[in-house]
Image (spheres, rainbow, N blue to C red):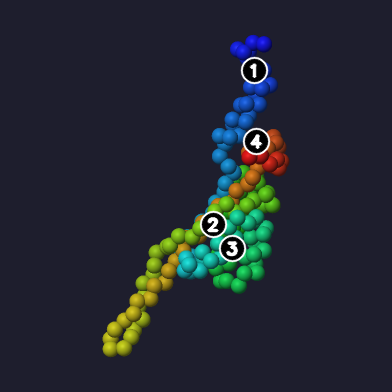
């Protein structure tokens, strides 16, 4: 047996496909909503509920949670799903929420008159909501016609 033998052409092709799959970035789509007139603390309470859920599961949760922040979060989630469908041709049923976070926006400062000519500050907080959705499937499973073929990558 020769230790210096060359690998077969089939084996080389398999290695190159595997290497391309490992180097390829995951299919990720995101959406942001800025200047939402709601406290980040209240929005974060809703985002922590849907983190890690599938797209459909998150929509059901948002539909029945009793918080006012659910409406803008649902809008951002639908926008992220539309971005994934438009940019990568990923159907909504294959999406999962990878990250969901909220950042502080600018604070609107108002005053409340008090006794003896004094005033108390009122801070009306705003939020920037960001949701990142991903798919567990590879970009190489798109056939030539643009149809999406779901094949799970093993890790």
**How many C-alpha atoms fall within 10 Å of the one at disc 1: few (<14), some, or many (≥20)?**
few
Label drawn at residue 49: 3
Under tag 4, what secondary structure? helix
Under tag 2, what secondary structure? strand
Write down the residue under mark 2.
100
- Outermost residue on the front side: it is 1
Q: Is residue 86 left or right of residue 103?
A: right
Q: Position of residue 93 (x, y in %)?
A: 69, 52
The residue depicted at 58 percent of the width and 42 percent of the height is: 26
Write down the residue under mark 4.
140
**How many C-alpha atoms fall within 10 Å of the one at disc 3: few (<14), some, or many (≥20)?**
some
**How many C-alpha atoms fall within 10 Å of the one at disc 2: few (<14), some, or many (≥20)?**
many
The residue depicted at 64 percent of the width and 10 percent of the height is: 2
Q: Position of residue 135 (x, y in %)?
A: 63, 47
Label drawn at residue 7: 1
Cα separation, mark 4 vs mark 2, equals 27 Å
């Amino acid at each position: 047996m020769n230790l210096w033998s060359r690998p077969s052409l089939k084996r080389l092709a398999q290695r190159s496909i595997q290497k391309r799959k490992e180097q390829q970035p995951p299919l990720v789509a995101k959406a942001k909503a800025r200047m939402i007139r709601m406290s980040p603390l209240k929005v974060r309470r809703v985002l922590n509920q849907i983190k890690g859920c599938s797209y459909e599961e998150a929509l059901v949760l948002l539909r029945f949670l009793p918080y006012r922040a659910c409406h803008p979060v649902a809008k951002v989630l639908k926008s992220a799903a539309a971005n994934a469908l438009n940019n990568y041709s990923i159907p909504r049923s294959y999406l999962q929420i990878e990250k969901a976070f909220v950042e502080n926006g600018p604070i609107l400062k108002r005053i409340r008159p008090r006794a003896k000519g004094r005033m108390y500050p009122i801070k009306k907080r705003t939020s920037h909501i960001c949701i990142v959705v991903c798919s567990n499937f590879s970009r190489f499973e798109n056939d030539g016609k643009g149809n999406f073929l779901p094949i799970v990558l093993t890790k």
